[in-house]
Image (cartoon, rainbow, N blue to C red):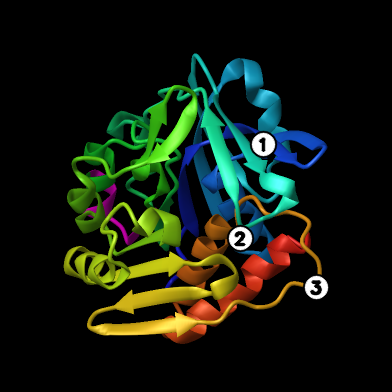
Amino acid sequence: MSSGEGYLLIGPVSRDHIVRGDSHEVKAGGAVYYYSRLLSHLGVRHTALVTISEDDSELLEEFPDKTRIVPVYHDRTVEFENIYSNGDTAGRTQRSNFAENPIEVEDLEGLASLDWTAVLAGPLLPSDIPLRTLEFLGERHRLYTGLQGYLRHPQGRSVILKPAGHIWRVMEAGDGVFLDVNELGTISDNPLRALRMLAEHTPEAVVTCGRRGSVICHGDSRTRIRAVRAVRELDPTGLGDTYMAAYVHARRMVGPEAAGRFASLMATRKLEGEI
């Protein structure tokens, strides 16, 4: 398969507040940011179309040097506060300012017609990538979507999980979707039923389960991937995004199980602070 222009990554850049015990760190975040770090680590060409406030453009300096950035400026940058209770990477509480920064079809002018290996959509909130934009991309390219943004909704400033009304069309727009085990519970409180429902609406679905590994649904098959044990846990934010980018890249060359093992290894390296 020709590498073409490499990967197109779309979604917001966020200002992330990472709270672990007594530690408070402010940094660039968002799925696209973590996709770019993984692809840069692998030496793979990619372009990131990102939304951000021009006042916060210094956050773009945190992207890898190899990332080609195409900014779409809005009034506010989305912010997230990720609170890890007692420093535990498995338990996270989230808050957000819920800034609405949609990427419209018109923002893709000059990019949509290029020969991308695949498009990785990384919304953080339901408004980030409207369904019209997602379907436009899915009609023209291989498209993989992180579902988290379509499952996050406000309860005050807190983030709660529930599916968007058009979640099935979101899944049907592309070639695969990614979510974690907590997000899977918004599809159905019965995990097996939720997996079956995913399989009915997307060719490939990957559910990450933290220390319990991941589950890949591909056609009628279901494969469990063990997590790679971390030597140390330094950087827990963005693990699912790292897994997604690694999996999509590996799937160009290998089957779901091998791609899952590779993605699990890359996620652990991210957790250890190596990516």
Q: Which residues are magenta?
A: 136-145
Left or right: residue 221 compared with residue 259: left
On the image, the x and y values in percent for residue 89 come to 67, 55
Q: Point out which mark residue 28 bears.
A: 1
What residue did someone put label 2 on?
A: 39
Q: Is residue 180 visible?
A: no
The image quadrant of residue 117 is bottom left
Magenta run includes residue 137: yes
230 and 142: which is toward the camera: 230
Magenta run includes residue 141: yes
Q: Is residue 152 visible?
A: yes
What residue did someone put label 3 on?
A: 231
Q: CA distance from mark 1 to mark 3?
A: 25 Å
Which residue is depicted at the point 64% across and 21% down?
A: 56
As helix, strand or loop, the secondary structure at mark 3 comes to loop
Q: Is residue 212 above or below residue 45?
A: below
Of marks 1 and 3, the one in the foreground: 3
Q: Is residue 51 above or below residue 132?
A: above
Q: Is residue 144 above or below residue 47?
A: below
On the image, the x and y values in percent for residue 261 come to 55, 81
Which residue is depicted at the point 74% across and 48% down?
A: 86
Quarter of the image where the C terminus is located: bottom right
